[in-house]
Amino acid sequence: MIVVTTPTGQIGAQVLAGLLDAPGTAPSVRVIARDPARLPADVRARVEVVAGSHADPAVLKEACAGADRIFWLVPPTPGAASVDGHFRDFTEPLRDVVGGDGIRRVVGVSTLGRGVAENAGQISASLAMDETIAAMDVHYRALCPPFLMENLLHQVAAIHRTGMFFLATTEDRVLRTCATGDIAATAVRLLLDDAWTGTEDVPLVGPDDLSPQGMADVLSEVLDRPVRFRRTTGAEYRATLVGFGASDAWARGLADMVDSLDAQGYYGADAPSTPETAPTTFRRWCEEVLRPAVRA
């Protein structure tokens, strides 16, 4: 039995689809869903559903009964009162369902930056989550992407209206990227493999070495219109997030994150590409995902 958290989320939904579409005889799948009604009817008919949050120890215990593998993702929660507390509240209940006859393998979504990132908000919290899980009686694979291409989907309206996108990073510095589809595909492969053991990071770094300006050039070509990059600051980003309703703690964490990305460079050129786990190019993603969204 495989348990999938965040089954209606950007990554979790793709993991669930990949498991259900896997060739051969795949293990049964159980999902933890805050709102089961958001699951497509055909999906609900093929999985077991436990309603609730995987931060709730009772919900997690019910979902993991008889299961030996779990896809683990701490969902972003802009209203959280504490970034570290949010990650801790989700991760600690996992301790009670792993080991022995319980969950034996965890595949979790984390980030690049281990050993480098400092005072990095949500990135630091993700890396601390990995350390917590690694100390449990369980085999663990931490999926470690850099900047997610899908983050640009939050700027579809700005790109459509103004021909601009905004990032808090230096214009000519390489920003490594990864598509969420590649994260999901790697997660599915690991969840279906019951042979791996121990704890390891799995880097997922796309094939491009583009700077934000290089990304703007690709966007211009794919959208057949000029697209420009404008650098913003962590403080501006924080103010924008608060304006959209994020808690000060969550906004401050994301501001610290983007400031650390620019200052410490762990999503940069020194991160080697991993085509075996992240083959999707930025151009292909723009053609298949961003362009239809901008033109919708």
Image: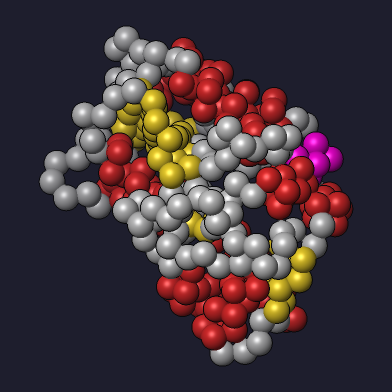
Part of the protein shown in magenta: 248-254
Identify the residue at the far front of this view: 270
Q: Up-down: is 101 above or below 72?
A: above
Q: Quarter-wise, where is residue 77 in the image?
A: top right
x 21%, y 29%: residue: 195
Check if residue 224 falls in the magenta segment: no
Q: Quarter-wise, where is residue 137 in the image?
A: top left
Q: In which quarter of the image is the C terminus?
A: bottom right
Q: Up-down: is 117 above or below 290?
A: above
Q: Quarter-wise, where is residue 91 in the image?
A: top right
Identify the residue at the far bottom of this view: 224
Q: Is the magenta stretch mostly helix, strand or loop?
A: helix
Q: Is residue 20 left or right of residue 134?
A: left
Q: Quadrant of the N terminus?
A: top left
In this view, the residue in front, 119 or 116, is: 116
Q: Is residue 43 among the parts visible in the rendering?
A: no
Q: Is residue 103 left or right of residue 262?
A: left
x 53%, y 20%: residue: 132
Q: Is residue 287 among the parts visible in the rendering?
A: yes
x 54%, y 86%: residue: 221
Check if residue 250 falls in the magenta segment: yes
In this view, the residue in front, 101 or 172, is: 172
x 39%, y 53%: residue: 274
Residue 245 rendering spot, x and y as whole percentages? 80, 49
Q: Is residue 107 left or right of residue 167?
A: left
Q: Up-down: is 138 above or below 230?
A: above
Residue 176 rendering spot, x and y as whole percentages? 54, 57
Residue 87 rendering spot, x and y as whole percentages? 62, 29
Residue 294 rendering spot, x and y as whole percentages? 59, 77
Q: Up-down: is 242 above or below 247?
A: below
